[in-house]
Image (cartoon, grey):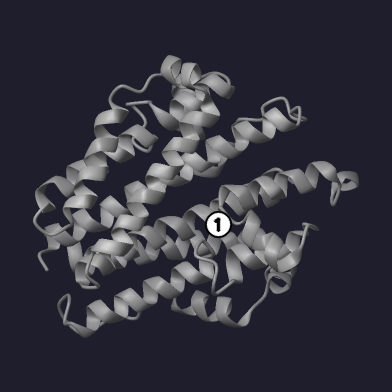
Amino acid sequence: MLRRIAGDLFWTARYLERAQWRARLVDVNYRMLLEVPPRDADPWEALVQITGEMELFGVKHSHADEASVVSFFTIDRENPSSIRRCIEAARMNLSPLRHLISSELWLEVNKLHLDAQSWSLEALTTAGITTFFADLRDRFYTITGIIQSTLPRDPAYDFIAIGTMIERADSVARLLDVKYHYLLPRLEEVGGAADARQWMAVLRSASALEAFRKRHGGVIKTDRVIEILVFDPTFPRSARFCLDRIAASLSRIMNEGGGEGPPPMAPGEGLLNILRSGSAADAIAQGLHGFLLNIQSECAATASMVFDRYMSLG
């Protein structure tokens, strides 16, 4: 497969996954604040911390309130990771590959791109934030379903899978790190109602609340949340699941002779072994913040290896 094609597919997947994550973050935070009055002075600032964009956000906004964060995450043309810009980038990458992908995938992404051109903060608030993001969530689910249902399981599919899973694992690690490291409640509130609501929001942001309740019931405990979002081999948004899928896709690509020279040791292999044999209790005991930072660094290393081996034109 040509390096340019591999790169376009990889980045299309990352942009679509990034846009979907951000849509869920805004939607869940908005719904949580409707249900429960905010305890913190800046209840929207955590979203910008999760994505690591405080510096870029601060250039344009002096305060992280609902309007500024929703605008920054959704429609800001100067934010390269806003939902609108991610959709535009995905569409641009797919445009020259229409002969390689299904017509259904192209039509759905192109239609979403066209609709996004008319988005504005006024239009969002007029339609209703919850209605807008519920519709957007369903459209991303449609795109995911089209990818799963219409693309052959070939190297093109594997590069899409790798891009999706790198972005997903990195996002879930950032989400958990901000909740555990930055939003840790006062000692007397640990395990209380406010703490439980925040962990519930974390699960909702990862579309994991129903899966969690089916497995653990209604009692939300920190180690159980970490278990399902980091170590669970069956939940499709856990770090373990994502790294398993990355390893499988890389193995198929390497077996088909992709790249030049002998296959390198895949980054994240050591971390994957830890995820396969470890537990939430182990990660918490050893320091969850450092553990989650390690997941993020391994995702970055894997992305660099994939780029150097399969996409670099140099």
Q: Residue furthest right?
A: 188
The image quarter containing residue 282 is bottom right
Give the class, few, some or many, for how many residues have Cα within 10 Å of label 1's Cα (few <14, many ≥20): many
The residue positioned 63% from the left and 66% from the top of the image is: 228
Q: Position of residue 100 (x, y in %)?
A: 12, 59
Give the residue drawn at x 54%, y 35%: 26
Residue 182 visible in the current orientation = yes
Q: Is residue 105 above or below residue 66?
A: below
**Which x, y percent locates residue 313?**
12, 59
* Quadrant of image for the N terminus: bottom left
Query: At 38% across and 64% down in the image, what residue appears?
Result: 301
Quadrant assignment, res 260: bottom left
User: What is the total number of numbered labels drawn onto the structure image?
Assistant: 1
User: Residue 72 at x, y = what percent?
Assistant: 45, 27
Quadrant including the C terminus: bottom left
Judged from the image, the secondary structure of the residue bearing numbered disc 1 is helix
Of 37 and 184, nearer the camera is 37
- Report the side of 111 relative to 17 (left or right): left
Q: Nearer the viewer, residue 220 or 279?
A: 220
Q: With 18 as the anchor, is 193 left or right in this view?
A: right
Pointer 1: what residue? 173
Residue 177 seen in the current view: no
In the picture, measured across the screen, residue 12 lies left or right of residue 232, that is left
Amino acid identity at mark 1: Ala
Residue toward you, 307 or 35? 35
The image quarter in which residue 117 lies: top left
Give the image location of residue 237, x and y in percent.
Answer: 51, 61
